[in-house]
Image: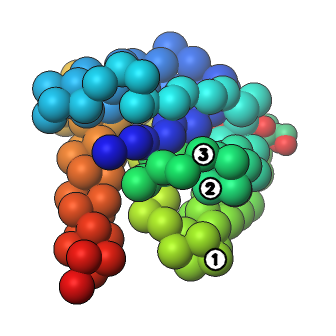
């Protein structure tokens, strides 16, 4: 299995914690480091393009998109969230590839911290588990 991870550098204290949670989870489930490809984009808005490039150039079983958009700090919060949600869905449909939405969309930095290794867990871990499940789902039908 091969998994590509696209990480937004905006709010990197949060997104790098999501990345670490995702990578650690994939390793714990038996993946090897060489099969986990991590690349970075400037902000969550660019996750769609990042996912598309990964889908085109890496023969991955799933792509995980990790980002963090904070409403209080982001005047065009709704546009970014809507764009990335729609964008990565389109990549998933177009390339017939599981593309996982690991983007925190929170009201405050505190809420983001709680979901990137705090009391609400780590969304990166959840994204990795979802990627594994969806890759297995895909393989089940490829083998029929
Ligand atoms: C510009 C911007 C702002 C204000 N806030 C965020 C944010 O909270 N989270 C995030 O991931 N990115 C943010 N960005 C950057 C945009 O995603 C994008 O990188 C720029 O608009 C350039 O296209």
- In the figure, 47 relative to 11: above or below? below
Quarter for ligand 1? top right
Front in this rendered view, residue 30 or 68: 30
Residue drawn at 50 percent across, 37 percent down: 5
Mark toward the start of the polypeptide (3 vs 1)? 3
C-alpha separation, residue under disc 3 versus residue under disc 2? 6 Å
Left or right: residue 23 versus residue 121 is right
**Residue holding disc 1:** 94
- Check disc 2 and report its element: helix, strand or loop: helix
How many neighbours does mark 3 have within 10 angstroms: few (below 14), some (14-19), or many (20 or more)?
some
Q: Position of residue 89 (x, y in %)?
A: 56, 71
Instruction: State yes or no: discs 2 and 1 in contact (Cβ < 8 Å).
Output: yes
On residue 58, the disc is: 3
Residue 81, visible in the rendered structure: yes
- Check disc 1 and report its element: helix, strand or loop: helix
Residue drawn at 32 percent across, 52 percent down: 131
Left or right: residue 10 versus residue 85 is right
- In the figure, 69 relative to 55: above or below? above
How many neighbours does mark 1 have within 10 angstroms: few (below 14), some (14-19), or many (20 or more)?
few
């Amino acid at each position: 299995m091969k998994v590509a991870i696209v990480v937004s550098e905006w709010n990197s204290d949060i997104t790098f914690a999501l990345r670490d949670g995702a990578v650690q989870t994939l390793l714990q489930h038996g993946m090897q480091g060489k099969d986990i490809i991590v690349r970075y984009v400037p902000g969550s808005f660019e996750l769609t393009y990042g996912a598309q490039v990964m889908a085109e150039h890496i023969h991955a079983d799933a792509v995980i998109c990790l980002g963090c958009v904070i409403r209080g700090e982001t005047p065009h919060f709704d546009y970014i969230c809507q764009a990335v949600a729609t964008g990565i869905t389109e990549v998933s449909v177009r390339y017939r590839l599981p593309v996982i939405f690991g983007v925190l969309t929170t009201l405050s930095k505190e809420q983001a911290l709680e979901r990137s290794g705090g009391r609400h867990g780590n969304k990166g871990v959840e994204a990795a588990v979802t990627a594994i499940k969806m890759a297995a789902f895909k393989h089940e039908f490829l083998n029929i």
